[in-house]
Image (cartoon, rainbow, N blue to C red):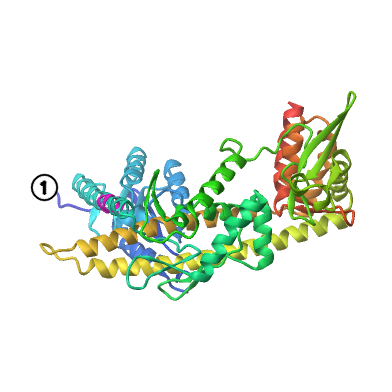
Amino acid sequence: MNQPYRPAPRSTLPLVRCAVYTRKSTEEGLEQEFNSLDAQRESAEAFIRSQAGEGWTCVADRYDDGGFTGGNMDRPAVKRLMADVEAGKVDCVLVYKVDRLSRSLLDFARMMQAFEQHKVSFVSVTQQFNTATSMGRLVLNVLLSFAQFEREIIAERTRDKVAATRRKGKWSGGRPMLGYDVDPRGQRLSVNVEEAERVRAMFALFLEHESLPPVAHELEARGWSNKRWRTRSGKESGGETFTRIGLRRLLTNVLYAGKVRYKDEVHDGEQPALVDPAVFRQAQQLLRSGDRGGGPPARNRPGALLQGLLRCVPCGCAMTPAHSAKGVRRYRYYTCTRAQKRGWDACPSKSVPADEIERLVLERIRGVGRDPALLRELLAQASLEGQSRSADLESEQRGLEHDLNGWQAEVRNLSLYIRPGEDNNPIVARLAELQERIGLVEGRVRKVREQMQAIRERMLGEDEAATALSLFDPLWGTLTPAEQARVIGLLVERVDYDGAKGKVTISFHPTGIRALADELAGRAKERRA
């Protein structure tokens, strides 16, 4: 006689430890008491409760990535999740939708391989499949394959469109450049007369000084800044002070010569040239000659500890290493580049003995380590500069995320208007443009976050800083000249010399002591080994 079926007692059911992963691409709304991450988690926890009869239970750890793209694996919570999977702490991973875990087929395949290797199942709460079954795995792969295919097609169309546009000499969008405005009647550039005069003046200043730093200082003194414009959302953007890198970017932009660039190709552009072609070519030759063969400026010339750091205050120019010989003796100097080019009478500083000013800088560094009050002052200054830089980065991040939200909303709205069998090319072209912008801005947001994290990690307490500087004297004499120059460069941002007043001012990097501590600790470890 057949015995009636009785379900297994609850105590004998295997325990299924479930981890809930949630993600949101931007940080907008995360400050709310109940946000998108909470909503995703609530749905997943409700699903887990519905499977309680099968032994499912939710682990205590939360795996929430707020403000991270799904296009890569550079997310703290997903890294913790994969580590716990490999450690055998998880039996099942639940998400609200597949794209919350990843938007990359390659990354997703790698995660699925890791799940399978550690016998971890994957559940998408709202898409009704479970990778514990063969049909679930098939449906998942089909969904991801089509998503990957769609992204790649959009990317290809975007690249083809940009290439065709540039080859016809048209401006294909992007950040507006100083000297031009975007014509409201279409994607064309029109000349901004006032800004165009400034652009020509910048080229003239560069040809006069033959160096980027003095031009950047002159622009700052005049109060000139980069292009400022209003985004579609009405937000003011741009207007940054010119740095050496920003100035180089402007001087090498072929737009000003009436050209457009696509990768390595240069084509005639529709926009009027702002700079005479001969002037533009001369500027490019000067920039190339100053690149020392295309690499960064040499800063480790043996015996020149302050190369690239020392500046003449009255002229606003760099002071470069020089030497003279008398018999067998060799005398080293740092000479103002303005005095070298325009004559000795053009500069009140002229030159300074290298040994003397290098000794002064070294003594100032040693003095910081010996004087607690001076060390506290330096750390306070570094903290203020770090906070200021962090505030600038946070402001930039908010602006970028605001743009991202607007573009993502536009993508969602446009997707509703795509109709099978109809001409969707204009919509698809706009979607492709938006996807490219979103990808670029998401990349910039990641870099901003990394820079903010680096600033936080580089800040030192007084005790740590004192310990780091205590290693300076014992190790200094063991370093080669090139290594000594590198150590100085880690700590010192610039040295200003005013020959007329006989005054030397040293500016330290905000995070320089941390960099110096890491460098000297590594040297001390090598020495002990």
Assign the C terminus to one quadrant of the image.
top right
* Residue range corresponding to the magenta coloring: 153-159
Q: Nearer the viewer, residue 514 or 250?
A: 250
- Residue 155 in magenta? yes
Q: Is 193 contained in the magenta span?
A: no
**Location of residue 449 in the rendering, given as x and y in whole percent from the top left corner:** 53, 57
Which residue extends farthest bottom? 234
Q: Quadrant of residue 372?
A: bottom right
* Nearer the observer, 15 or 267: 267
Q: Main secondary structure of the magenta part?
A: helix
Q: How many marks?
A: 1
Visible residue check, residue 40: yes
The residue closer to the viewer here, 26 or 287, is 287
Q: Amino acid at mark 1?
A: Asn
Q: Tell me: residue 326, above or below residue 191.
A: above
Quick check: 56 above or below 240? Answer: above
Q: Position of residue 51 (x, y in %)?
A: 29, 58
Residue 111 location in percent, x, y? Answer: 36, 44
Q: Badge 1 local density, few (<14 within 10 Å), some, or many (20+)?
A: few
Give the farthest residue toward the top: 328
Evaluate whether residue 51 shows in this view. no
Q: Residue drawn at (28%, 52%), measured in percent from left and top? A: 164
On the image, the x and y values in percent for residue 501 come to: 89, 57
Secondary element at image label 1: loop
> Is residue 203 toward the left or the right of residue 408 in the image?
right
Q: Is residue 509 left or right of residue 165?
A: right
Q: Give the labeled residue for mark 1.
A: 2
